[in-house]
């Protein structure tokens, strides 16, 4: 049974930073790309960032490029999202995602599993 457990969300002022963590279990972590998506109230879930199964070639949404950094440690079955210079429009529920084998999950259609989500609120 695959489980993705996120942590690290919270309330922060604009310009601040947060670091989200996601610990995966249930299948060989190093064989699967990982990603982060977010969903704000009344909006569709959208792609934020993703990283390949080997940790190469991170991909970012234009809205977060240069402010967010995705990384992973296959020995710890963990993926992180470092979020700097946060803006009020980054407020959303953030979800960890595990893609199909060998696939970097940049769209919802190739996500096999989702975490339960963690709330990020950025005040102005």
Image (tube, rainbow, N blue to C red):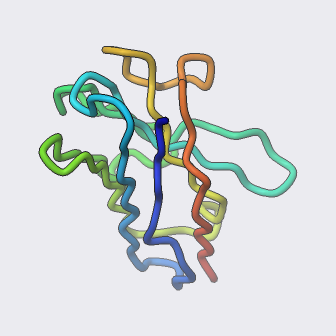
Residue 56 vertical placement versus 26 (above, below): above
Q: Count the marks: how many?
A: 0
View extreme (right): residue? 42
View extreme (left): residue? 75
In the picture, measured across the screen, residue 69 lies left or right of residue 43, that is: left
Residue 37 vertical placement versus 92 (above, below): above
Location of residue 10 in the rendering, given as x and y in whole percent from the top left corner: 54, 78
In the picture, measured across the screen, residue 50 lies left or right of residue 96, that is: left
The residue lying at 54 percent from left, 17 percent from top is 110
* Quarter of the figure that contains the C terminus: bottom right
The residue lying at 35 percent from left, 53 percent from top is 23
- The residue closer to the viewer here, 26 or 110, is 26
The part of the image, by quadrant, that contains residue 22 is bottom left
Location of residue 21 in the rendering, given as x and y in whole percent from the top left corner: 36, 60
Residue 67 vertical placement versus 123 (above, below): above
- The residue closer to the viewer here, 118 or 12, is 118
Location of residue 47 in the rendering, given as x and y in whole percent from the top left corner: 55, 36
The residue lying at 47 percent from left, 59 percent from top is 6
Residue 61 vertical placement versus 13 (above, below): above
The residue lying at 51 percent from left, 71 percent from top is 9
- The residue closer to the viewer here, 13 or 19, is 19
Location of residue 11 in the rendering, given as x and y in whole percent from the top left corner: 57, 82
């Amino acid at each position: 049974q695959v489980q993705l457990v996120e942590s690290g969300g919270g309330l922060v002022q604009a310009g601040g930073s947060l670091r989200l963590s996601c610990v995966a279990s249930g299948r060989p972590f190093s064989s699967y790309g990982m990603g982060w998506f977010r969903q704000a109230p009344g909006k569709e879930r959208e792609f934020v960032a993703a990283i390949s199964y080997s940790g190469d070639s991170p991909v970012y949404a234009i809205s977060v490029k240069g402010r967010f950094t995705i990384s992973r440690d296959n020995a710890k079955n963990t993926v992180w999202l470092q979020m700097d210079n946060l803006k009020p429009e980054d407020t959303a529920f953030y979800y960890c995602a595990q893609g199909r084998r060998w696939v970097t999950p940049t769209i919802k259609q190739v996500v096999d599993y989702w975490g339960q989500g963690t709330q990020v609120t950025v005040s102005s």
